[in-house]
Image (cartoon, rainbow, N blue to C red):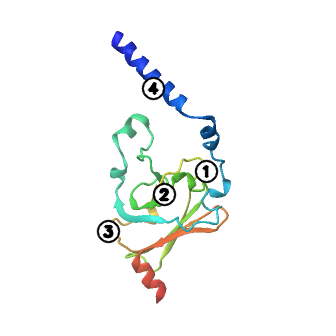
């Protein structure tokens, strides 16, 4: 008990010493920065440093999306990622894992994400639009799932893809495409 009291006393003295070293002038200079509403992505004019770090895709079966925790809670466990699906009740399908290169707080809620894909089983590219819910905390990685009747064949292959992120007002924030999509656009 005496050791615990001595340890607490040492911590208290350290805190007092740190507080005593700071002066009023330094506290005035270190005031909290004001929040700038124009820094929200999609509102700010400076979006040069924004972008999609990577995007990869793979087919995920219904069983792979279910975890043991779901048995106990009844809720889908998404490991802290935002998962958006074309058919919310269906889980099997092609998923695109999109990692953004900016801080999660900068992503404007209500953004629209357009995913265009060219597949081996469909001669024409298809575009799917996902809306980031305004009630969800957005993280840097988002999973976009083309599920249910939108991706009926587990053997289908993605030939090319393009992702466009738009602000709620419709302004293009960033976009990324596969190299093959870029070749198709040039021809």
Mark closer to the observer (2, 3)? 2
User: Which is more toward the observer, 153 or 72?
Assistant: 72
User: Which is more toward the observer, 107 or 154?
Assistant: 107
Residue 16 appears in view? yes
Above or below, 38 against 19 in this view is below
Give residue 140's position: percent from left, percent from top: 47, 55
Residue 92 left/right relative to 132? left
What secondary structure is found at the residue carrying circle 4?
helix
Task: Answer with mark 2 or mark 3, whichever residue precedes in sequence.
Answer: 2
Task: Answer with mark 4 or mark 1, whichever residue precedes in sequence.
Answer: 4
Q: CA distance from mark 3 to mark 4?
A: 64 Å
Mark closer to the observer (4, 2)? 4
Neighbor class of circle 4 (other Cα within 10 Å; few <14, some 14-19, many 20+) is few
What secondary structure is found at the residue carrying circle 3?
loop
What secondary structure is found at the residue carrying circle 2?
strand
Query: Mark 2–mark 3 contact, CB under 8 Å?
Result: no
From the image, tell me which residue sits under label 4.
Answer: 14
Residue placed furthest toward the bottom: 187
Give residue 93's position: percent from left, percent from top: 39, 61
Q: Residue at x 58, y 52 (%)?
A: 133
From the image, tell me which residue sits under label 2.
Answer: 85
User: Which is more toward the observer, 62 or 106?
Assistant: 106
Q: CA distance from mark 1 to mark 3?
A: 34 Å
Q: CA distance from mark 4 to mark 2?
A: 53 Å
Q: Residue at x 63, y 47 (%)?
A: 33
Above or below, 58 against 26 in this view is below
Q: Which mark is residue 155?
A: 3
Q: Which mark is residue 134?
A: 1
Residue 147 appears in view? no
Neighbor class of circle 1 (other Cα within 10 Å; few <14, some 14-19, many 20+) is few
Task: Answer with mark 1 or mark 3, whichever residue precedes in sequence.
Answer: 1
Q: CA distance from mark 4 to mark 1?
A: 44 Å
């Amino acid at each position: 008990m005496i050791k615990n009291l001595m340890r607490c006393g040492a911590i208290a003295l350290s805190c007092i010493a740190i507080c005593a070293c700071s002066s009023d002038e330094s506290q005035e200079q270190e005031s909290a920065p004001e929040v700038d509403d124009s820094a929200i992505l999609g509102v700010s004019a400076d979006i040069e440093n924004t972008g999609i770090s990577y995007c990869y895709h793979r087919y995920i079966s219904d069983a792979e999306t279910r975890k043991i925790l779901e048995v106990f809670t009844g809720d889908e466990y998404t490991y802290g990622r935002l998962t958006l699906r074309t058919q919310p009740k269906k889980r099997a399908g092609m998923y695109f894992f999109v990692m953004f290169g900016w801080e999660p707080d900068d992503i404007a809620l209500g953004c629209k994400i357009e995913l265009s894909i060219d597949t081996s089983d469909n001669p024409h590219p298809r575009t799917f639009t996902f809306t980031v819910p305004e009630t969800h905390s957005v993280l840097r990685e988002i999973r976009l799932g083309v599920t249910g009747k939108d991706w009926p064949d587990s053997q289908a292959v993605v030939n090319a893809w393009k992702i466009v992120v738009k602000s709620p007002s419709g302004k293009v924030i960033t976009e990324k495409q596969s190299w093959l999509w870029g070749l198709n656009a040039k021809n």
